[in-house]
């Protein structure tokens, strides 16, 4: 067996694909939520710059 022969029969590609899809959906949902203090008005976080 050479170093380039791989046995991929034991891997579950469908479960891995579902896991990646779920992770990406969770990240997309978290990024779409409004975040407090994320405005660009120089007063984000309650500390206004004068």
Image (spheres, rainbow, N blue to C red):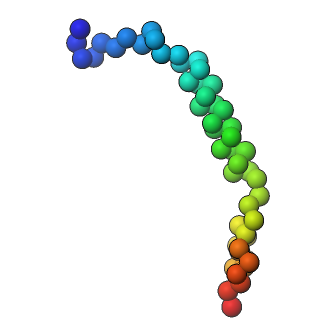
Where residue 31 appears, x then y in whole percent? 69, 51
Residue lying farthest bottom? 50
Quadrant of the image for the C terminus?
A: bottom right
- The image position of residue 23, as x and y in percent, is 63, 36
Residue that sits furthest to the left in the current view: 2
Disc tally is: 0
Left or right: 6 in relation to 45: left
Residue ID at (73%, 69%): 37
User: From what the image shows, is residue 18 above or below residue 31?
Assistant: above
Whether residue 10 sits left or right of residue 4 in the image: it is right
Q: Is residue 35 above or below residue 24?
A: below
The quadrant of the picture occupied by the N terminus is top left
Residue located 53% across and 16% down the image: 12
Name the residue located 45 percent from the left edge and 9 percent from the top edge. 9
- To which quarter of the image does residue 36 belong? bottom right
Quarter occupied by residue 6: top left
Above or below 14: residue 47 = below
Seen at 30% across and 12% down, the residue is: 5
Task: Please tell me in which quadrant of the rendered image residue 39 appears.
Answer: bottom right
């Amino acid at each position: 067996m050479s170093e380039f022969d791989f046995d991929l029969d034991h891997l579950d590609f469908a479960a891995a694909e579902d896991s990646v899809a779920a992770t990406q959906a969770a990240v997309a949902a978290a990024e779409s939520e409004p975040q407090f203090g994320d405005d660009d008005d120089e007063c984000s976080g309650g500390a206004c710059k004068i």
